[in-house]
Amino acid sequence: MSTAAKPDFERQLHAEVAKYYADPKGFALAMFPWGRKGTPLEHHPGPDTWQCEALDWIGQQVKERKFNGHDAVAAIRFAVSSGHGIGKSVLVAMLVCWIMSTRPFAQGTVTANTITQLNTKTWARVQTWARMCLTSHWFEINSERMYHKQYPSSWFCAKQSSKEENSEAFAGQHAENSTSFYFNDEDSAISQTIHEVEEGGLTDGEPIIGLFGNPTRSNGPFYEAVFGRMRHRWRQFVIDSRNSRYTNKEQIAEWEADYGEDSDFFRVRVKGLAPRASDAQFIDHERVLAAQKREVVVLPDEPLVAGVDFAWGGSDDNVVRFRRGADARSIQSVRIKGEFTRDPSVMVNRLGDILARKYDGRSVAMMFLDSAGIAGPVAKRLRDLGHRNIQEVNFGADSPDPKFRYYRDYMWGQMKDWLLTAGIDGHPELESDLVGPGVRNDSRQRVWLESKEDMKKRGVDSPDDGDALALTFAAPVSATRPAMAMPNFPQSWMAS
């Protein structure tokens, strides 16, 4: 191209790119060398069908928000859950090129579950596609960043490790007059901490966030966005690998023959569906779903038992759960915000009300309290008020059953068996909590549940409802025993 022709070409290119501000599919079709001999796209006429669907949806969201350049609009949120090999990182690359080319002073971050995945696949795709794009000469792209040559510090996209200790690198990304964007590849294994910091970059301008991954876990932020309680906030694209033109159909057929179409292996690696049970999951999802649907019969003399899980801090809830025999559905749970644990008198009043009232003509025969935190002073005050049907339970005490490591593990084991014939409510908090805890390795092959702290590190909420229901299995409560009497508890696990 001659020197004289370059300004004219640039004017035409800028005018062409401007057409695609709200049309990422149009941008992808116009800016990449589809079908051109000698290029990586020689044998590809355009994006795959599912990619076109996602690009069209994103473009429609841009149009609906009508960002005016200064008043913030709601974030565009989407999550792609799929089997292997459908071209998720290719879509990431196309979107990065579209945003960077159509939005001056955009700022973005691309991450992945491991540095190897990020370097060799996700960021490598971004580099390849950015260099194929007609706007490639506007940008510098290297092993760490893609940035506009004239504005390297204010118009850029950077790759970042998703390690928790690197979370500060995700903070401070704002584009008040443009787009702040985040794309997470293999998001199932990216921690809650990273997701929380990313949320801070979605508060102004025209923000966009996309989560991509194989649904290897049945909990965590990616699961919640696609299949769980946060799915109302996201647009989900669940892609079966068999429907993508990029995938190896012979390999998929072998997997189907070896594992079966309904196996967790096939569900995750081909269908893009969450596993029924992860490798470390203690309670499987199918057991919980069946208990939600099951109708149960309760004998008239079954005692009413309550379990109280106290919050450890303001982010958790205090939860009271009720059970009569196989029925943990009929009486609604009670939730008290964790902030009230600062004032034990609030909990004393609420629990005193529960112990004083009747539920379908029955009083609580026994209330078991998690002995951690404020349980001691709360229990003492309740006894001073005349309530004798309460008992603290030490989660960390030795288990009475040698198959379990601690008393909490024992109670969850009893609850797991009970779920096979029980009925529970469909509250999403309870469902998530029951399938949330994994198991840790134990040298004596005992059941040892994952701690609340470890669950939070991998992005899973504290199982407040699950622990509250598990407490109803702390000890047998006799149907013939007077309601205010105490069962005989092993001294080894009773709180002092």
Image: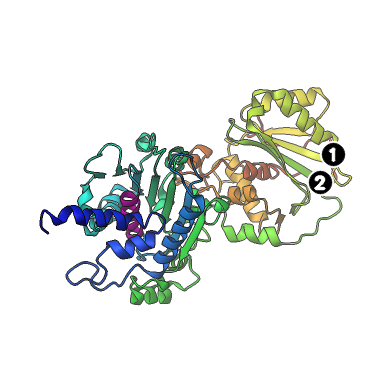
* Residue topped by disc 1: 483
Count of number-bearing discs? 2
Residue in the image at 41% along x and 50% along y: 189
Specify start and end residues of the magenta stretch as a single range.
Answer: 89-102
| Residue type at numbered disc 2 | Pro
Left or right of 24? Residue 273 is right
Position in image of residue 233 (x %, y %):
55, 50
Left or right of 169? Residue 192 is right
Position in image of residue 89 (x %, y %):
33, 58
Residue in the image at 35% along x and 67% along y: 47
In this rendering, does residue 144 appear at all?
A: yes
Instruction: Please check the rendered image and state whether residue 94 is part of the magenta-colored stretch, yes or no.
Output: yes
Q: Are the residues at dot 2 and dot 1 in contact (C-beta closer than 8 Å)? A: yes
Q: In whole angstroms, how far apart are the C-alphas of marks 2 and 1?
A: 8 Å
Q: Main secondary structure of the magenta part?
A: helix
Q: Quadrant of the C terminus?
A: top right
Position in image of residue 204 (x %, y %):
46, 39
Please state which of residues 196 and 481 is positioned toward the viewer in this rendering. 196
* Residue topped by disc 2: 303
Please state which of residues 229 and 385 is positioned toward the viewer in this rendering. 229
Please state which of residues 463 and 316 is positioned toward the viewer in this rendering. 316
In terms of secondary structure, where does tag 2 sit? Answer: loop
Which numbered tag is attached to residue 431? Answer: none
Mark nearer the N terminus (2 vs 1):
2
Q: Quadrant of the N terminus?
A: bottom left
| Residue type at numbered disc 1 | Ala
In this rendering, does residue 219 appear at all?
A: no
Residue in the image at 65% along x and 29% along y: 495
Please state which of residues 226 and 405 is positioned toward the viewer in this rendering. 226
Position in image of residue 407 (x %, y %):
60, 40
